[in-house]
Image (cartoon, grey):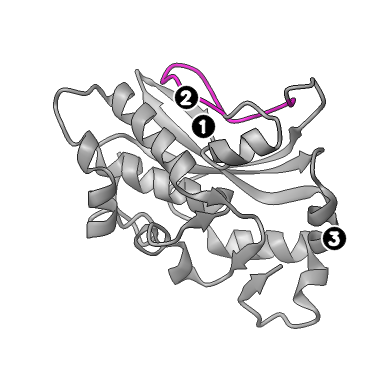
Amino acid sequence: MKYLESTYCFDFENDSVQNLISEFKTDTLSNKEKAIGIYTKVRDNWKYDAYNISLSKEKYKSSYLVEKQSGNCVEKSIILIACLRALGIAARLHLGKVKNHIAVERLIEKFGSNELTPHGMVNVYLNNKWLKMSPAFNKSLCEKLNVEPLSFDGENNSFLQQYNGKGNRFMEYIDDYGHFDDVPLDFMIKNIKEHYPSIFNNNDKKTEFKL
């Protein structure tokens, strides 16, 4: 299955990814237990950061991303997919567009919108079905926003935090771009330029953004 293969971005043979999954490389754990464990580890070991964006392909390799301390939704999804594939569990990148409704002041200031695109999540194949999960928001950030962190039980989808602890709308999916076997950088660049033209400041050749 192609969703088990190493690719340019999901280069899971590297030592960094192998070290990350070392505790799960055992026959005593089921694939379900491995998926739950590595999902939680990736969710919380990298802080979510939506304000650093790269358009350079090499910056989307799992071997590069695991060395960082933070990442956006796509970057953290890449790390998780590489880990899952390294453990022999089929996984793929799924992209869409979301709208945030809480703590959006900085988003609107930097992006000109409270919509985030492309938003990344993970499809994982367990027990003969594809499940959706999102490792984007680390537990400490969720506590700060009064939002329950997304847990993954290996049996149900876990990709959307609709409401916070007070019952107020937190986020919603407003578009679905489908799934990909590797990182579709050309599509992502086109998508970012269409939705956030102001961040380029008439410089289409710029590849790194710290907003």
Kindly identify which numbered label has been placed on residue 152.
2
160 with respect to 10 (left or right): right
Disc 2 and disc 1 in contact, CB within 8 angstroms: yes
Q: CA distance from mark 2 to mark 1?
A: 7 Å
The residue that disc 1 covers is: 133
Q: Amino acid at mark 1?
A: Met
In the image, the segment drawn in magenta is 150-164
Q: Is residue 70 above or below residue 209?
A: above
Q: Is residue 157 magenta?
A: yes
Q: Main secondary structure of the magenta part?
A: loop
Q: Is residue 159 magenta?
A: yes
Q: Residue visible at 53% across and 55% down? A: 71
85 with respect to 97 (left or right): left
Q: Quadrant of residue 90?
A: top left
What is the quadrant of the N terminus in the image? top left
Q: Earlier in the sequence, mark 1 or mark 3?
A: 3
Kindly identify which numbered label has been placed on residue 109.
3
Q: Residue visible at 68% across and 64% down? A: 190
> Where residue 165 sits: x, y (%)?
73, 22
